[in-house]
Amino acid sequence: METIEVLKKYKTSKIIRLIKRGKLNKEEVLMCSIKLNNNYLSSYILDKFDINLDYTDSYGSDFIETSTRYGNIDVIKKLRSLGMDINKKYKCGRKDLCVMIFIRDLDTFKYFEKYFDKKDIKNALESIIIVTLNTYNIELLDYIIKKYKVNIKKIKYEVNKKKYNLLEISNEILSGMKNREYRKREMAYYISDLLGNRYKKVQNRAYHLLEEIEKENIKIEKYNKYIKKLFGD
């Protein structure tokens, strides 16, 4: 069983006992607790265990990067107090950029604004903006555009050796979402019709799937409209 599944299955007290017995790797547990926003467990591990702050997971991600990606400001503060360097540079294409390139929410962005100079922030903006495409975060994008006077019409991203502007990519994502919606909708209805009333749990799961798809589509629709408005379409 993967560590993250263990954290979902067992109570925090049992997880701690397993770490003490050497049954679980404390760094792996810390990384997973950050992803699950289990701040009690994260703080306990950082307070009670000697943690290798240079640890990286199988994807090469460190604790600061992961905390930034998941918007876990409490853990970021704790890591900084323990001496972890937030000024480390990360490879993004051909550039070395600050940890802000992993930001997905406005609160984390505002937190890091205090610690990085404008040059570092501006260098990271294009990468942050592309993240908003995947998270449909209008609030974060709007803040960046207004505060840093970003002209998104000039920003182009390379996909399969072809360059697209933000509106073109947003349209592609919206189109892909609608195609995915159709496939999942058909499968969900097929499952629920096939099972009828015999297996209510599975039928309810199928309809829950449809509700989640609808919520996701509403977000990307709003984001797409916002981008079109910025482009003057």
Image (spheres, grey):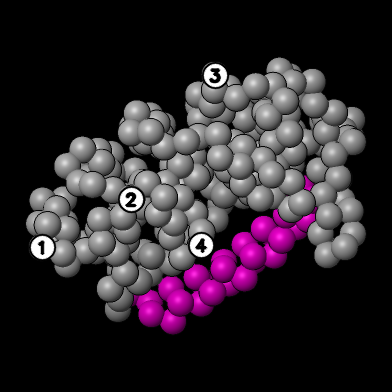
Q: CA distance from mark 4 to mark 1?
A: 26 Å
Amino acid at pointer 4: Tyr
Instruction: Please tell me which of labels 4 and 1 falls first in the chain.
Output: 1
Magenta part of the chain: 168-197
Q: Nearer the viewer, mark 2 or mark 1?
A: 2
Q: Helix, strand, or loop for circle 4?
A: loop
Looking at the rendered structure, which numbered label has been put on residue 21? Answer: 1
Q: Helix, strand, or loop for circle 1?
A: loop
Amino acid at pointer 3: Lys
Q: Helix, strand, or loop for circle 2?
A: loop
Are the residues tagged 3 and 4 within 8 Å (C-beta)? no
Instruction: Please tell me which of labels 3 and 4 falls first in the chain.
Output: 4
Q: Is residue 197 left or right of residue 148?
A: left
| Rendering coords of residue 163 (x, y %) | 89, 53
Amino acid at pointer 2: Asn
Q: Which residue does the image show at 72% across and 25% down from the upper left?
A: 119
Visible in this render: residue 225?
no
Q: Nearer the viewer, mark 4 or mark 2?
A: 2
Q: CA distance from mark 2 to mark 3?
A: 26 Å
Q: Is residue 3 magenta?
A: no
Q: Residues within 10 Å of mark 2 (few under 14, many from 20)?
A: few
Q: Nearer the viewer, mark 2 or mark 3?
A: 2
Instruction: Please tell me which of labels 1 and 3 falls first in the chain.
Output: 1
Looking at the rendered structure, which numbered label has been put on residue 114? Answer: 3
Q: Residues within 10 Å of mark 1 (few under 14, many from 20)?
A: few
| Rendering coords of residue 109 (x, y %) | 56, 28
